Image (cartoon, helix red, strand yellow):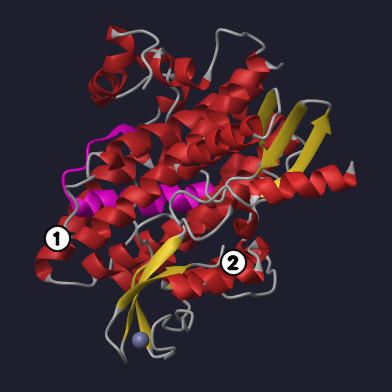
């Protein structure tokens, strides 16, 4: 099994997994019951997608000690390959919905390519996930529009989220060593235009504009993270670290 | 062997979806194949949604049922392709859903991914029929209901809120 493919599977799994952990912070804390349920459902989808990638990575590793659980709970910060965007804390609801839009549109475009993969398991995971991601895009687009084109207060809140999160969107389309065109079968950087087009369409209705000339942060894909990931992993992995092999 | 398979399908008809108990796993269309060899059996199921928490419970219930029916070795394997769609739900299943108070998914033709995203993005909502008074004057409250597979609707006519098993 090629190391690159394993790395790519872990990267995909880690990104959805970390975002699901971040979103799960809202479980029972959503602004209203229906939206609490919505974000929790999206979170479950992301966790399910992460599991599909972890399970396949575990199978391909050929190492019986490696399981979806060991990949999720027993790797440290530098081994995690998730996008920086998904590990950042969300200051309020506007951060949550804006990040979901950025990530879901990115996922959609990547899965559309992976659906054509010669690796049939990767293609199957992508096809399965695409249906779910479509709902996530619709939901997050509506929220970004509602807040952006809402009150003065809601507009200023989501504008702040945009300023804080935008520098982390460049990384989505900068290929890591395991994401070259030869390895993936498509040019990742070319998907950026489709992504910008979709985000711009939502922004137009939300009365927001794409920030220009912003320095883009990178590092997550190769394990160089912000200070936030360590804290997140500490909480998420605590049980398996303290009681190895615990099940219920 | 074919008659054997028919028996097994009857037994699987006794396994229901833990989240929508009126539906059996056959109604849901999640059983894709079975392979029998002497006293060993492998059942292939496909998840409805990637993160559906009912899948683990369903796999467990299938094992229990088949062990109860005398199989010594039961394996449940999850297959992702082809991806599950509500079009695989049986007509009888849709009828049972309706009687249970959940609006069943509407059948529709397959569409390309671009059509899919266009429809999802800014398109109008599907006209869903109220399972209680049969009015089609209903409105979407939330795309996400009590489980991933359902959306939350309200009837403008009889005012009752209800779940809609959304097309997938
Ligand atoms: Zn009604």
Query: Residue A141 location in percent, x, y?
Result: 37, 63
Please say whether residue B69 is visible from this viewpoint.
yes
- In-front residue for pair B88/A119: B88
Q: Is residue B97 above or below residue B37?
A: below
**Magenta-tinted stretch:** A85-107
Q: Residues within 10 Å of mark 1 (few under 14, many from 20)?
A: some
Q: Which residue corresponds to the image point at 31% horizontal and 88% vertical from the top-left?
A: B156
Residue on which the image places disc 1 = A156
If the image is split into quadrants, where does the C terminus of chain A sit? top left
- In-front residue for pair B2/B85: B2
The verdict on label 2 being within 8 Å of ligand 1 is no
**Tag 1, which chain?**
A
Q: Cα distance, mark 1 to mark 2? A: 48 Å
As for residue B117 lying within the magenta part, the answer is no
Residue on which the image places disc 2 = B93
**Tag 2, which chain?**
B
Q: Is residue A135 above or below residue B81?
A: below
Q: Which residue corresponds to the image point at 83% horizontal and 26% vertical from the top-left?
A: B38
Q: Residues within 10 Å of mark 2 (few under 14, many from 20)?
A: many
Quarter of image, ligand 1:
bottom left
Query: Residue A203 location in percent, x, y?
Result: 35, 65
Query: Residue B66 location in percent, x, y?
Result: 65, 35
Q: Quadrant of residue A82?
A: top left
């Amino acid at each position: 099994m090629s190391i690159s493919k394993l790395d790519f599977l872990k990267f995909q799994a880690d990104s959805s997994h970390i975002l699901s952990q971040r979103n799960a912070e809202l479980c029972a804390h959503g602004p209203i019951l229906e939206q609490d349920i919505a974000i929790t459902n999206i979170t479950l989808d992301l966790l399910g997608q992460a599991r599909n990638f972890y399970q396949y990575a575990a199978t391909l590793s050929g190492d019986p000690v490696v399981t979806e659980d060991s990949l999720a709970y027993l790797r440290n910060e530098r081994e995690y390959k998730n996008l920086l965007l998904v590990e950042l804390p969300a200051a309020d609801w506007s951060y949550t919905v804006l990040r979901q839009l950025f990530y879901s549109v990115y996922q959609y475009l990547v899965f559309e390519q992976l659906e054509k993969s010669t690796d049939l398991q990767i293609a199957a995971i992508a096809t399965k996930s695409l249906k779910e991601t479509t709902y996530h895009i619709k939901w997050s687009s509506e929220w970004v529009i509602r807040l952006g084109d809402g009150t003065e207060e809601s507009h200023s809140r989501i504008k702040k989220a945009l300023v804080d999160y935008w520098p982390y969107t460049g990384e989505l389309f900068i290929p890591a060593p395991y994401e070259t065109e030869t390895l993936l079968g498509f040019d990742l950087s070319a998907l950026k235009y489709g992504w910008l087009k979709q985000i711009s369409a939502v922004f137009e209705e939300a009365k927001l504009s794409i920030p220009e000339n912003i320095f883009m942060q990178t590092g997550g894909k190769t394990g160089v993270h912000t200070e936030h990931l360590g804290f997140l992993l500490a909480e998420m992995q605590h049980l398996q670290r303290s009681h190895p092999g615990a099940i219920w | 062997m074919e008659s054997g398979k028919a028996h097994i399908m009857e037994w699987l008809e006794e396994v229901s979806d833990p989240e929508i108990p009126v539906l059996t796993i056959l109604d849901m269309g999640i059983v894709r194949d079975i392979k029998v060899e002497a006293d060993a059996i492998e059942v292939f199921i496909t998840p409805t949604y990637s993160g559906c928490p009912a899948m683990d419970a369903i796999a467990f219930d299938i094992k229990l049922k088949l062990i109860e029916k005398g199989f010594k070795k039961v394996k449940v394997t999850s297959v992702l392709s082809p991806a599950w769609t509500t079009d695989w739900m049986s007509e009888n299943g849709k009828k049972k859903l309706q009687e249970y108070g959940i609006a069943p998914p509407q059948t529709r033709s397959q569409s390309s991914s671009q059509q899919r995203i266009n429809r999802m993005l800014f398109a109008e909502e599907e006209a869903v029929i109220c399972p209680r008074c049969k009015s089609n004057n209903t409105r979407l409250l939330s795309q996400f209901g009590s489980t991933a597979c359902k959306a939350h609707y309200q009837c403008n006519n009889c005012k009752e809120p209800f779940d809609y098993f959304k097309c997938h």
